[in-house]
Amino acid sequence: MKKILFFDATNQWILVESFTLDSNGDLTPVSSYSGIHPRESSKLLIQELRNVLKNSNWQSPDLIVSALGPGSFTGLRIAVATARNLAQLWKIPAIGFDSLNVYTSFYHEEAGDPVIVGIEAKQKKIYFGMEDTRGFFGSIDVKPDDILDKIPEDRLQAFLTSQKYSDHPEFFAGNPILENLPSASAILNRNLELLQEAIAFPDRFPYWKLVPNYVRGTYVDDKSTA
């Protein structure tokens, strides 16, 4: 039985989840925490990691999985630095996923329909991701009015019939994410072979390969549009 620790602090919430992975490839949730904490990830992430480890009755996991962004510049740095430091400390492998891929996987599995996730990104833009039966499309830094121009023709129908999820529905309309925070269960179950490979061959997944997903070239806020 292998132990997997996932966390996300790249946006205005903190997610921490522990799972076991057995020899048959079955992933089982053990303990979890989710909460809305804008601008508090530096204070609370380590605390909640400790709590989930304690509730799981673990000293350490066998694999760390982190969300990599896009999202808050500070949140990205904290999440990736924490994942790298813990993997180095515990001498275990670490892997990462695009944050929007984590979210779209969860909502697509929950809804059973094509889904769109929009995360408010300042400068009158969102970080956009989409998932349908063909998989994930994203992440894109885009103004809401320009999204249609970015959608491939073969995904246009899915886009037009998708369910939308948003962390700021007053800016980008959609089901409020803050009322139904996501889980990593879907993205992990879709990548079981990758998890097994990382555990079996840890040297292929060293901590230093984790890199924040800075979709935007600059994080200098335009104060007139923030």
Image (cartoon, rainbow, N blue to C red):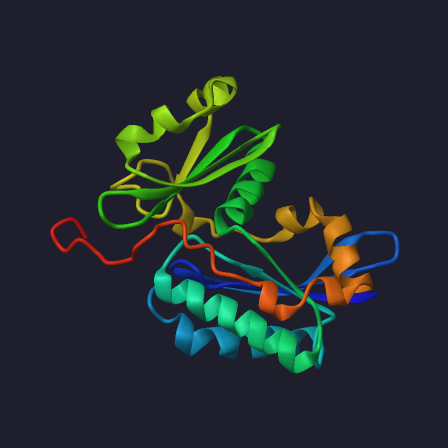
Residue at (64%, 51%) from the top-left corner? Answer: 185
Residue 12 lies, in percent from the top left, at 38, 59
Q: Position of residue 10 (x, y in %)?
A: 44, 60
When the figure is inspected, residue 90 is found, relative to residue 173, above or below; the finding is below
State left or right for residue 200 relative to residue 38. right
Residue 181: x and y, percent?
48, 52
State the residue at coordinates (46%, 49%). 180
Whether residue 36 is visible here, answered yes or no, is no
Q: Is residue 4 left or right of residue 184?
A: right
**Image coords of residue 154 (percent x, y):** 52, 18
Q: Nearer the viewer, residue 99 or 204?
A: 204
Name the outermost residue toward the left.
224
> Which residue is painted at 62% across and 69% down in the image?
207
Please state which of residues 113 and 55 is positioned toward the viewer in this rendering: 113
Question: Is residue 33 at all visible to an observer of this figure?
Answer: yes
Pick the quarter of the image with the N terminus: bottom right
